């Protein structure tokens, strides 16, 4: 079986229901959330074999992360298990309807994953792999994670495995300047570059005009495909021509994980039928994600295909 | 007391909260839901004596169905109690915000009701009745249910009791062709025919132009009143003239049961003040239904009248 | 420390989740809710020292009210503790999406607060106070509460403490005529008069044209500042000139307490930077309130300032 | 159908889960609870026709009480409906594991029921009745309730309907002396007197030796049957001979309503097979009650008979 | 990797919290529960590779079953996926504290599994297997399941894979006589026979003296090991000698799945260190199971070993 | 007002309901828990003025800790507020009925409190204080916390404030040897030494005979009073004579915080009436604690006095 591999940290996400507060609530809802594992879950649910490389503490919290991913069919056999006393990364979310914004408190410093070392990982998995997916979050998490990303890129190149890279800038982890300096050499090694317009502007210094920014990134980093996500305006991409895809109308339940769903949909659609399909699958999966509570998509391949055919918005099927 | 009687199957509805999934949730919400009993509940809450004829297993699940209906004042004295080992019909619902749709998994085959036989029912109730309400779901549930509907129609005719019939096509139960064949002779015996435009088109082969479809059905089945529901466009009816009623603006919490609320409102309004009142009450009750979780309406007659007078939308009364 | 004092009754609010009913629910959510204590909580959260004068039963329910207020930092040292057999006021709320309205059932007659007597209160607190906030609810609650409001006004005048008065008419407590008769002499003693346009029209007989009503009230009651709240149209005020403030766009979770949040925001902004700031802070805090479940605001001063700077509606900060 | 009638007040019971506190909890569980209606529910579930006479406010809370009783099959056609502004009695419960005790806060003064007048009730129901059940709580609730109890006794005597009376002393409503004075003349008119040993001692001044107390009450009030409940020691009764019944072993979930379940079981068993059966059914139903959350029993006649045959303690039937 | 395979049906278990009723509850808790998959989960959690053979509907409910098992690491690659319209078996549980018993309502007739055919299964998995586990439930579920069990036994024998068989009689599925007739030839082909004393008596006609029954079964069916479980008295076994193991003291949260946990513990312990270890591991895992809500054990190998070393009953480790 | 001051770290405690697992649960219950702040809460609820010195992050999680303590009346004016990016300490609890034990996963390294420096604290509070309470947890949390404890001791001595010290050994924080070395010099400066027998044995090397251990500690550290807690065997103390106090019978809901409740009860009772009263209040408050979910006691002084008078085990007061 050819496999799509992703690598990164996954956290326990502790959140409260809409209108409730972290300060006042007496229960927190628990989800698992990590950009790269969310991509792996979405791919597995669409029927593609996926595996996730990471480092988790060998205690109830690390097992929780593993169990929630494994139930969707992600292969966890390459996860490095850290001692039980290592800490599981967490973050806290309070959803804020307008005019509030959603507030995130990260608590991921010194996590089990932040201590990962390239040599701990069994890289043989990349030799049978079809694809590798990375994000710009991982290099922000410490020297070990950064070295591990570099090693993954090197192993992928050695094995001839193409790499997609989602810039995914996190302002609470590092400055735009630090991110730009660290990410540029990594991005330059990838076949597919995925970036939000916002990150293109504030991190990579691109124009705030979408098509200008797209062509600028494409020229600068020279991937096979450059993809720019535009939020409610959809997404555009360039390989040898410009592709445009509008966004779907969506009633949002939970916005977290939208970008990861897009990335998964793009990879799946691109592998199946090229860049245009990638954009279509990506925007559809991103829209579907926003209808699920938590960072993960729960739809199947047939659910996605139904939306791609013609979303019968709000209809009851009985 | 003159009584309105309905006949049909009622299920346990197991659903998850918006954004959650049947696959992932660890608790399911339980409601009782059946088109005909929902009509009986709505009528009872509006102050009309109503009774419901059905067949339930004599176990905790059948008692749950009975208790949830009885609390609203529906007379259950004509329910046939099946052995405890008979099965209570259930269905599972996952509400899907756009671009997902709401998904329903029926589990009603071989239920206690599907085994009902006409001779089990004490039809004497129809002799004191003022009205009988039937739907097109029941004949789809098996030979016994179909024969029981035919018997109910015969008994009603013998007793001079007018009958309303709500087409209520369910694609997961039978094909449009099978439904059309089975329902046409039943519909032709009814005083009031209620049908959604969608069912008129796909089952009864009517035009997708509302007024054309209305006149077509009226000419074909010759009821005293034909009512066509149009979703967000309201409803229209014909007896000796055309009646039009726009829909109310509504913030939807739960769309299931909207059609049954319309039917109940129509019957109550029609009995009180004719077709125009029937349409007004029907669209108002349908709108109110969508504000309640579950298939049932919980409003009282005075709540309905307040909405009919001039709904001070969203106001707080204190 | 200079302190802002408010005086009034606080109730236990028992409510059900959207779409559920008081009649059908098996659990009720419990919040504490009282116009004047909600103002005290909001002020404390914005960093202003606030105290609340009231009368509570010395039992688990009275302690619940006290605890929920104290956690936000409100000074309760002037609360009068009634015997445990006195009753804690309650009310029940069923939120009704359109076309339903939200229904409130008060159960506050004969409460511990309704038996308050002016002489029970230690009025020395007013001598160090910077401000006193009253509402038109309290005089409707009985002779004791009315006399206590009058005494508070007298003590404030004696100490040179300015008073704000929020008309806050409650139709379930008294008629517009009774309210007008009782409130007019009280309002005439206040530095800041806050009134909704609806109350201005139905209780104080003002025009339904906002600016006409504003100038009319200002001329009639001669406060230093008259403030008129206009719901979705924002708020206007007059001191020596006319001030206008539009409302913010808001996704409402729970509308109760909006007016109290406005009053708190106005007082805080006014004390900090005058009438225009009062209107800006008031409308922003009112908008924020609607994003929190319960009658209270949970935001901090920096949250409010962020919204005032430029609400990045719906953005995720991570 | 011959009917057993009970008369009294039913409250909304607001409680918290074991280990939680009324002061700290953010949700309260809601049950309906009233000694006499709990008897009516238990009898209806055992298959005896029962009706309940009371007075409820015509609002969502009164309808909740009615709905929760009606679902079990109790006939509510004799309930007097008070204006919506009347108050529904409530009480609050915090269960306290040892060494705490369970704490109850009543909030029933000035309720709709406390204002009942004898002439409001349609007493014709007693003419077809087979039995009337009263308790010593009702006379403590006000002059109207007391007069209504007296009238019910007079009507029952006129119709030849036997009466059972459960002393049910409530220390938070009146003193032992006041209760003794009010209850003695009522008890003297009853066919069946039910009293706990504790109430016999502290209210009726009996010995704390069970059999001495039993014979003393029997001699003093001269009912056909005197029943003394002894908690974990079971119950004893005297008609023309002494009957003894030990209690069943029970794992208690919720102790409230135990005495009412006993009374219902006694009445049902006594009507079916005499005093010994009454004691057996009463102690069994009391034990079953303690396994249900809330004041009501949910078992059926066959569940009760199974326990009477041989309680298969803790077995799983599958 | 050598693998332990089990085969059988898994249901959705819908239950209510202690003291609540299926009839009255508005939410049901959902677990997955099936004797053979519970064994597979327990083995996987103890670190043994396990796989489960079954047939599930390809819809949200079937995926729920699969996901809940896969999260623990069970290999589901041999599950046969039935059409989405096939039904997922369910059952309903109401836990009844003494003197009630726990009541189970099965709803598993006509399920996807009941239609399994031997030829649908990829039996190649048995060729690499180390062990096969079967139960006496499967043959009761229909002709297809029975033929599939027979085929599994034949394939195991052909591959030289030893088989364990847990009698697991279900009175709601068939009579003791039918079970005895069907199970005897199956049991006679197994290496390990596991049976409760209760089933040995009522199905296999053994003595109610444990050791007599054990020796009788051992003589009759001639397995390598016969194991008799005795509930609170522990378990005994015979291979070439008699082994005795007392039960552990346990505070029971949920008794369902105890027998399956014993079977898994026995298999794991037996494979590691023989019959005595099997009994010790089985009784320890059975005790641990009763401390978890749901049918599954959640402990790890190290948790089990800690209990085996010396259960530090109730201690807090911090 | 004379004030009792405590100093230490408070965590967010994330736990699951009995029988559920950290690995499987989808919601976690949130409590605040810290040995020293639990003592402060208990004292405040008993009517003694208490204050708590600590360091919290100025974000929603730090405010949650502050709010939950402030609601009980603890004075937080000496809390040092760290930047919002500092981390709030957390821990995770899974309660395990026998034969499981309760498992705790600490996540408190690098917390805001672990970075506290002695000079950050406003020690003037100690000059008006009546008592200072410390525990052996704080010195285990880092150099800053250890220096802060030493400074607090020095300040208390300078101000003539007596100090109580609860040994409270935590095996997950340091070894018995490290604890013994660090704690011995601190304990030697205290007026009241509180220690569990278990800690006395494993950390301080005392005999496992209670009275021998008590006299040994008393001789070694020379406090005014030495208190040894014995779990279910109660507590003993020595000042100039030996005091013995048996434990109360208790139905445990949640054991965490028992020792802190004992310490608070001892301090309150001792200050009011000497060592014997301290032991009586301590064991009673410890028993009451175990009936509340969470680490805190919620009872009032009158609840405690009622238990001390004669615990009416399990009685319902109504």
Image (spheres, coloured by chain):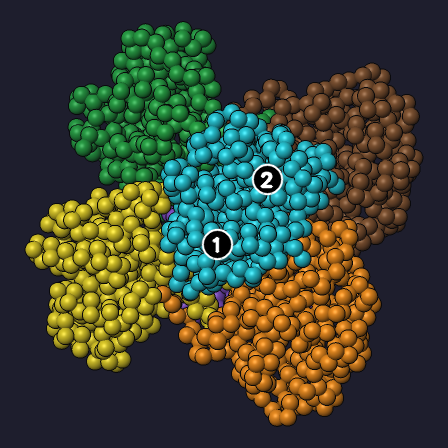
Chain colours: A brown, B green, C cyan, D yellow, E purple, F orange
Q: Output the chain of dot 1.
A: C
**SS of the residue at dot 2?**
loop
User: How many numbered dots are placed on residues in this image?
Assistant: 2
Q: Is residue C224 visible?
A: yes
Label 2 sits on residue:
C224
Dot 2: few (<14), some (14–19), or many (≥20) neighbours within 10 Å?
Answer: some
The quarter of the picture where residue F73 lies is: bottom right
Name the side, left or right, on which A70 lies relative to A192. left
State how far apart marks 2 and 1 are (Cα): 21 Å
Name the side, left or right, on which B38 lies relative to A245. left
- Estimate the x, y position of residue F245 in percent, counting from the top left: 55, 84
**SS of the residue at dot 1?**
helix
N-terminal label among 2 and 1? 1
Residue in front for this viewpoint, B129 or E2: B129
Farthest bottom residue?
F241
Q: Is residue B117 visible?
A: no
- Estimate the x, y position of residue E110 in percent, counting from the top left: 44, 38
């Amino acid at each position: 079986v050819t496999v799509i591999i992703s690598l990164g940290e996954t956290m326990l996400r502790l959140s409260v229901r809409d209108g409730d507060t972290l300060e006042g609530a007496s229960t927190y809802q628990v989800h698992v959330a990590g950009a790269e594992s969310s991509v792996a879950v979405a791919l597995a649910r669409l029927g593609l074999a996926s595996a996730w490389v990471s480092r988790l503490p060998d205690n109830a919290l690390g097992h929780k992360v593993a169990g929630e991913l494994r139930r969707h069919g992600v292969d966890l056999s390459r996860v490095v298990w850290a001692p039980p006393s290592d800490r599981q990364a967490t973050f806290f979310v309070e959803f804020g309807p307008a005019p509030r914004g959603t507030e995130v408190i990260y608590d991921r410093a010194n996590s089990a994953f932040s201590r990962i070392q390239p040599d701990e990982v069994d890289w043989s998995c990349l030799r049978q792999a079809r694809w590798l997916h990375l994000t710009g979050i991982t290099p922000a998490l410490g020297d070990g994670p950064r070295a591990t990303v570099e090693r993954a890129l090197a192993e992928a190149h050695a094995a001839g495995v193409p790499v997609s890279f989602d810039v995914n800038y996190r302002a609470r982890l590092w400055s735009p300047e630090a991110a730009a300096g660290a990410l540029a050499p990594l991005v330059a090694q990838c076949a597919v570059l995925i970036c939000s317009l916002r990150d293109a502007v504030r991190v990579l210094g691109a124009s705030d005009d979408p098509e200008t920014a797209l062509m600028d990134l494409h020229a600068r980093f020279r991937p096979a495909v450059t993809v720019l996500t535009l939020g409610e305006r959809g997404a555009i991409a360039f390989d040898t021509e410009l592709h445009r895809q509008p966004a779907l109308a969506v009633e949002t339940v939970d916005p977290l994980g939208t970008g990861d769903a897009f990335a998964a949909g793009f990879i799946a659609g691109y592998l199946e039928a090229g860049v245009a399909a990638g954009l279509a699958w990506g925007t559809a999966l991103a829209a579907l994600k926003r209808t699920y509570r938590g960072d993960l998509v729960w739809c199947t391949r047939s659910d996605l295909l139904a939306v791609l055919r013609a979303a019968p918005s709000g209809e009851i099927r009985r």
